[in-house]
Amino acid sequence: MGPGPSDIHPRVLSALSRPTIGHLDPAFIAMMDEIKSLLQYAFQTDNPLTIPVSAPGSAGMESCFVNLIEPGDKVIVCQNGVFGGRMRENVERCGAAAVMVANPWGKPVDPQAVEDTLKAHPDAAALAFVHAETSTGAASDTRTLCELARQYGCLSIVDAVTSLAGIELRVDQWGIDAVYSGTQKCLSCVPGISPVSFSDRATYRIKNRKSKVQSWFLDMNLVMGYWGTGGKRAYHHTAPINPLYALHEALVMLEEEGLEQSWNRHQQNHRALAAGLEAMGISFLVDEPYRLPQLNAVWIPEGVDDAAVRSTLLQDFNLEIGAGLGEYAGRVWRIGLMGYASRKQNVLQCLSALEAVLAAAGAPIYTGVAVAAANREFTST
Ligand SMILES: *Cc1c(COP(=O)(O)O)cnc(C)c1O
């Protein structure tokens, strides 16, 4: 129950052990087509350029920036946690200038600050931000931010690593131009693959660049020759065959459950966990409307030894929770309820284990009420 990788369903693990076949085998190519359309479903998009990049979420981030940004461009980057800082690194390594919109950590990106910045920089090529900040547990209003980007003639680049399958995300309806995700958060698949999707506007930009994409491996003009729509497929790199079996299975399971049902399940388990934690006297870092159901950042109670509690949870209860990052290191815990890990038994186990460890440490919490509060929340919905 950390910030990812999340637990993997046995069906996905067993898909991983299917026999490895060739990356141009007709059966494999048929599966590639299914993965693309299942990803279109997960992203809620018709974008033909919707594929899994053969590397982790960070490579999905990098593929959005290296393909869309050229030397000399200006990019507006919003930062309200760890990952916005990495976006800035990407922009600068593309030879472009990053104009930062700084928001306090734990708060969503402020649309008014973004609009002011767009107005002040009418020559900006793109607006980049994180939908679900895993470092703090805050969700930003992606729909509004993408509308602003369109209004001011910018492409939008959205980090959906933690949001995909966990909270509402509608790539086409919200007008997102480039989006990347990861497999090990709410998709509950093995780490190491990054689903990405580019709108027609973004694809046009990629096909009509003045300069070559500086990364050979991530150049979508080349990757499209392997993953491309219709036509003959040519070898570009050896796809991670077995992890893609796992991704296929995870996406089939998402389709079986239903995307909106998956969003609702994450919400419901979060509400029960929150009810239990709050009954114990533990409060959240993020204001209620912006809380991510899949990443619960909570204040560590007064006088409690952060590392000792996490290590006892791991040793005595086989339970991992995440540490705080940056200015919240040692001050908050990040409790993940992602994908297959977002289920009732985990909520109840986490509450009872945390209560046992905190009570033993003499922490100022209310005991004997958390599990009951969570159960009340489960039965009321
Ligand atoms: C996990 C994460 C990433 C990085 O993904 P990796 O698979 O670790 O490379 C990027 N952005 C966000 C918001 C994340 O949570």
Image (cartoon, grey):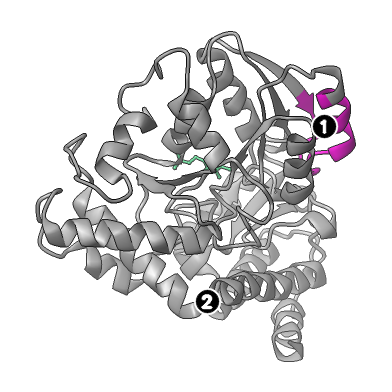
Q: Residue at x 53, y 47 (%)?
A: 161
User: Would you say 339 lies left or right of 373 here?
Assistant: left
Q: Give the class, few, some or many, for how many residues have Cα within 10 Å of label 2's Cα (few <14, many ≥20).
A: some
Mark identifier at residue 319: none
Which one is in front, 104 or 28? Answer: 28
Q: Residue at x 18, y 58 (%)?
A: 28
Residue 138: x and y in percent read: 73, 49
Range of magenta residues = 101-118
Note whether 292 is above or below 177 in the view shown. Answer: below
Note whether 12 is above or below 53 in the view shown. Answer: below
Which one is in front, 162 or 327? Answer: 162
Q: Which residue is mark 2?
A: 258
Residue 233: x and y in percent read: 20, 44
Q: Amino acid at mark 2?
A: Gly
Q: Residue at x 29, y 45 (%)?
A: 227
Note whether 293 is above or below 112 in the view shown. Answer: below
For the residue labelled by badge 2, is the local secondary structure a helix, a strand or a loop? Answer: loop
Note whether 239 is above or below 217 in the view shown. Answer: below
Indicate which disc, 1 or 2, sits on the residue closer to the N terminus: 1
Residue closest to the far bottom: 379
Residue 253: x and y in percent read: 40, 74
Q: Quadrant of residue 369?
A: bottom right
Residue 107 is a magenta residue: yes
Does the image show residue 218? no
Q: Give the class, few, some or many, for how many residues have Cα within 10 Å of label 1's Cα (few <14, many ≥20).
A: many
Q: Quadrant of residue 117?
A: top right
Distance of mark 1 from mark 2, alpha carbons?
33 Å
Disc count in the image? 2
Q: Amino acid at mark 1?
A: Val
User: Would you say 307 lies left or right of 40 here?
Assistant: right
For the residue labelled by badge 1, is the local secondary structure a helix, a strand or a loop? Answer: helix
Q: Which residue is mark 1?
A: 114
